[in-house]
Image (spheres, helix red, strand yellow):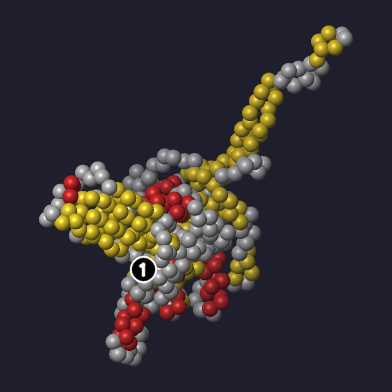
């Protein structure tokens, strides 16, 4: 008998199904179905001694493939971790942004008149606070390295990181080092790893003018064993990439002086594993507004709205009618300033209408993920400025909720120019009411 479970990286906002294959039995043969769910951070080897949840089913089996959806349990685990997405510093991958998960199972059934117990553990997989699409099927394994959109628009003061999913330890973009370890463990030797055309070897920035610079990936960058080390972060915004370039002493055109640049993941033969393009967009009239959000891969992403924005003030309050005047020796009297209908519990809320400016047709996927996101931050009080070849990055973020619930996903055949309008509201009132 076999237990069918997820592998790789899966999103906890979609069903995560654990199924036992009881082919050849009848439902009445199954005595009980017990699952112990373990989820933890840190090192993969640091599996806790006790599970966070236990599913124990002893009756009501309608077929021989008992199945449990553990996604709601893992989603609750994410929700209870305040630091999971590092709201204080959105360019870092917090230790709780992903979790190791393993399921121990114990299924007892009757076979040939004998009681049989099937026990064991599933393979360890990684859960993230993302989701799969219906057409991708159950337990979708997120296999793409770049956990963001492949095309984005940014101002020269935007700062964001490109998350690179490295895969399970020794099985993904770091496979060259596990290959080396296996060879050495078998008593062999390797003269040079540079000849091996497997895994991630370098990250290259190719500018629109043909100039380029390249970061040589090290073992320390990709071969870590803790959960947060399975995602490598590379500076990708014009501001923080310019700072990185200057610190490394690379030549070539600085990001803020380009129209666009490509960030390419390369193997040792300079083949492109995956690539992301950043359009450096200048806006002369309006003040751009940037939103950071957790996308469907469970990673921080961002969208900059370049065109006109409007802020609307909405005040909510409660009212009651109080008694006016008073009785005295001269009868019942009141003054002209008496307050009859009174208001209290005033709450001031700011709503902002944003416009992207002209974007490509593929941007519809970004907008869909933004509307689906449960964690969105707006950049406020940004005073980032350039000094020479580098930027002094200074900005704050504030939580917002997306109010727009319906959006037409535009196509060039229908709309010659594509612009998306979005309405957001700060998640807290302006007068700091709790």
Residue 274 image point, x, y percent: 36, 67
Q: Position of residue 196 (x, y in %)?
A: 31, 82
For image coordinates 43% across by 68% down, the residue present is: 46
382 relative to 413 in the view: left or right: right
Q: Quadrant of residue 295?
A: bottom left
Q: Is residue 133 left or right of residue 233?
A: left
In the image, residue 214 above or below residue 331? below
- Image point 50% across, 55% down: which residue? 81
- Residue 17, how many percent across, how many down? 30, 53
In the rendered image, which quarter contains the C terminus? top right
Looking at the image, residue 408 sits to the left or right of residue 259; the answer is left
Q: Please identify the quarter of the rendering in which residue 105 is found.
A: bottom left
In the rendered view, tell whether residue 297 sits above or below residue 173.
above
Q: x%, y% of residue 69?
A: 32, 50
- Which quarter of the image is occupied by the N terminus? bottom left
Whether residue 358 is visible: no
Residue at the location (23% across, 55% down)?
108
Against 209, residue 305 (above or below) is above
* Residue at numbered disc 1: 167
- Say few, some or many: other residues with alpha carbon within 10 Å of mark 1 (under 14 / 14 to 19 / 20 or more): many
Q: Secondary structure at mark 1?
A: loop
- Work out which residue is located at the far right of the displayed protein and give it: 329
């Amino acid at each position: 008998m076999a237990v069918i479970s997820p592998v790789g990286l899966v999103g906890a906002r979609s069903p995560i199904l654990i199924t036992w294959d009881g082919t050849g039995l009848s439902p009445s043969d199954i005595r009980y179905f017990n699952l112990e769910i373990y989820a933890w951070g840190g090192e993969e080897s640091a599996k806790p001694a006790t599970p966070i949840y236990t599913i124990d089913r002893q009756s009501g089996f309608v077929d021989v493939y008992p199945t449990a959806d553990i996604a709601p349990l893992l989603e609750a685990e994410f929700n209870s971790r305040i630091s999971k997405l590092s709201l204080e510093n959105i360019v870092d991958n917090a230790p709780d942004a992903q979790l190791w998960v393993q399921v121990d199972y114990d299924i007892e059934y009757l076979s040939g008149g004998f009681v049989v117990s099937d026990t064991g553990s599933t393979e360890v997989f990684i859960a993230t606070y993302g989701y799969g699409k219906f057409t991708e099927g159950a337990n979708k394994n997120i296999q793409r390295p770049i956990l963001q959109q492949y095309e984005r628009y940014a101002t020269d003061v935007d700062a964001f990181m490109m998350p690179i999913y490295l895969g399970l330890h020794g099985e993904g973009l770091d496979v060259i080092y596990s290959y080396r370890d296996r060879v050495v463990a078998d008593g062999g030797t390797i003269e040079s790893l540079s000849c091996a055309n497997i895994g991630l070897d370098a990250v290259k920035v190719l500018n629109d003018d043909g100039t380029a610079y390249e970061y040589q990936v090290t073992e320390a960058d990709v071969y870590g064993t803790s959960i947060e080390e399975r995602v490598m972060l590379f500076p990708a915004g014009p501001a923080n990439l310019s700072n990185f370039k200057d610190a490394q002493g690379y030549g070539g055109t600085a990001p803020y002086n380009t129209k666009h640049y490509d960030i390419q993941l390369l193997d040792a033969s300079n083949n492109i594993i995956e690539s992301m393009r950043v359009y450096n967009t200048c806006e002369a009239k309006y003040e751009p507004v940037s939103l950071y959000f957790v996308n469907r891969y469970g990673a921080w992403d961002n969208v900059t709205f370049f065109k006109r924005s409007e802020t609307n003030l909405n005040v909510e309050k409660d009212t009651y009618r109080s008694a006016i005047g008073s009785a005295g020796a001269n009868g019942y009297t009141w003054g002209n300033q008496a307050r009859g209908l009174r208001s209290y519990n005033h709450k001031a809320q700011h709503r902002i209408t944003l416009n992207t400016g002209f974007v490509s047709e593929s941007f519809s996927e970004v907008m869909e993920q933004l509307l689906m996101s449960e964690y969105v931050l707006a950049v406020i009080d940004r005073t980032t400025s350039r000094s020479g070849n580098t930027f002094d990055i200074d900005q704050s973020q504030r939580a917002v909720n997306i109010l727009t619930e319906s959006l037409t996903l535009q196509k060039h055949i229908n709309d010659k120019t594509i612009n998306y309008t979005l309405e957001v509201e700060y998640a807290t009132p302006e007068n700091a009411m709790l």
